[in-house]
Image (cartoon, helix red, strand yellow):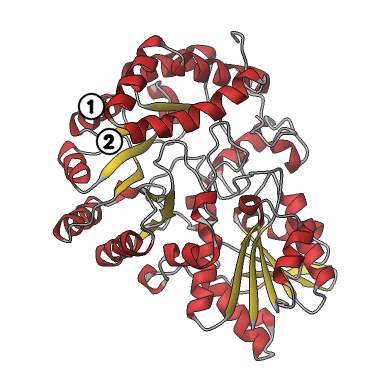
Amino acid sequence: MKILFFNPPFKGRFSRTSRSPAVTKGGTFYFPIWLAYAAGYAHQEGFDVRLVDGPAQGLSLPDVWERLGSWIPDLAVVDTSTPSIYSDVAAAAAIKARFPGSFVMVVGTHPSATPEETLGIAEGVDAVALGEYDQTIVDLARALDEKKPVREVAGLCLHHGDTTLLTPKRGLIENLDALPFVSEVYARHLDIRDYFFAAANYPLVQIITGRGCPYHCFFCVYPQVFHSRRFRTRSPENVVAEMAYITQNLPQVREIGIEDDCFTANYSHVRAICTLILERNIKIKWYCNVRGDVKPELLQLMKQAGCRLVTVGFESGSQKILDNMNKGVKLENYRRFVKDVQTAGIMVHGCMMVGNPGDTSATLAESYQFSVEANCDSMQFYPLYVYPGTEAYDWAKDKGYLRVASYDQWLTEDGLHNCVLDTPELSADQMVALCDYYLKKYHLRPKYILKKLLQGLRNPMEGYRTLMSAKVFFSKFFSGQLSRSNP
């Protein structure tokens, strides 16, 4: 049984696995993390696997046919996202036309949230996998190989005459240690130099140490659609063993990205990982996503264990707006955290969101003022992106705020993020203009530029990383893809 795992081409360096899929302004391009985990698990279970990343390698569909040569997949697994869904199902249909005997399925958060709708637009697609699909694909491959009824495989949506059929619901994977190291999958199938995160040292690899998130932010797509907000972790021993594997087998890697939705959701888990890193003397830098309320003693331990940077979704500098989006955190926690993380010597990449319930020009000015006070090493400003399956999408749809009728309007022609909602307080155009204005204003402050210059002099690698990101930023700015005027 041969299985093709395919990240299909779409609008150049389209970062499909990012939490908000797009061609990014800072050049960030994520590994196909979920697809790679599933490919590695299928390989581990004895199947002949190919993982092909079209956007990373600049491949067209004819390029893919040429690369596969005489290798014909029995099962093809095609990754998707909301803004690329029409192109993705067309790519899946092209695989079916090229290999008529193959069983073709699509995966991802979008078809998980809209399985019947997706099958309705997906001519030639045999099935949709719902949620976490690692075990689903293995079970499906075995059923196809043994010619057993596919409808008995849990976690699928299938064509059934003129309608669709949902097979039994699949439970989540409890033992995450049963999955292979995703870094091994990258080494086997991908070129790690194709991937980039603007806030991290290059080259890097991205891993997951836990799936799901116990918090209830109303916009976050993976916890809601993939993981049902069920938080599970790999054992600390398993995580640190992968870090050791990376240092020994991928010596060119300068940093590990821990891409959990919230790495610090379980303090004891983080503490155990950091302690093992120190005990085993593993020397590699890493970054992670955290909540803006981590205790100072844990930050100090993370720094000792190699944590170079944390990414924090502040989202707003207004307590009212934080409450409206179910963030469950207080501004005083943020202010304390900013001081504590700087004392620990860890860099911060902050994120601010525009367009949450109740947001106005005044609350956004509060957010910008908080950003300046925090003085993070980099700061992102972006409109609220709502995706099917999330509370944010349901809120926007129920209120009549969605201004687009088609998923392909989630992006601009260039593949950049497109704001898709108008609220009574802010239009989509105002949100985009404010984000561009604050992005430009924050990063062009003399105080900020001086900080980055001094940082680059003290640490040439940080200077190189900043230069790479700045080149992309200024190319967007001078080409008009960032607003040059005040909103």
Q: Residue furthest bottom?
A: 146
Using the image as rendered, state which of residue 453 and residue 256 is in the foreground. Answer: 453
Going from the N terminus, do you reach mark 2 or mark 1 first?
Answer: 2
Amino acid type at image mark 2:
Asp
Circle 1: is it few (<14), some (14-19), or many (20+) Cα within 10 Å? Answer: some
Q: Position of residue 235 (x, y in %)?
A: 28, 65
Residue at 27% in and 52% down: 266
63 horizontally vs 51: left or right: right
User: Which mark, by number, is residue 293?
Assistant: 2
Quadrant where the N terminus lies?
bottom right
Q: Which mark is residue 286?
A: none
How many marks the image carries: the answer is: 2
Q: Is residue 55 above or below residue 426?
A: below
Secondary structure state at the residue bearing disc 2: loop
**Percent position (x, y) of residue 178?**
39, 74
Q: Is residue 353 visible?
A: no
Q: How far is mark 2 from mark 1, CA to CA?
A: 8 Å
Pick the front one: 38 or 322: 38
- Asked whether 318 or 139 is in front, the reply is 139
**Residue 11 seen anywhere in this rendered image of the structure:** yes
Q: Position of residue 419 (x, y in %)?
A: 65, 29
Indicate the amino acid at tag 1. Answer: Arg
Is residue 25 shown left or right of residue 407?
Answer: left
Residue 406 relative to residue 321: left or right: right
Q: In the rendered image of this protein, does residue 143 appear above or below residue 426? A: below
Are the residues flagged by discs 2 and 1 in contact, CB closer than 8 Å? yes
Front one among 462 and 217: 462
Name, please, the residue furthest toward the top: 486
**Residue 345's x, y, as percent?**
22, 33
Q: Which mark is residue 336?
A: 1
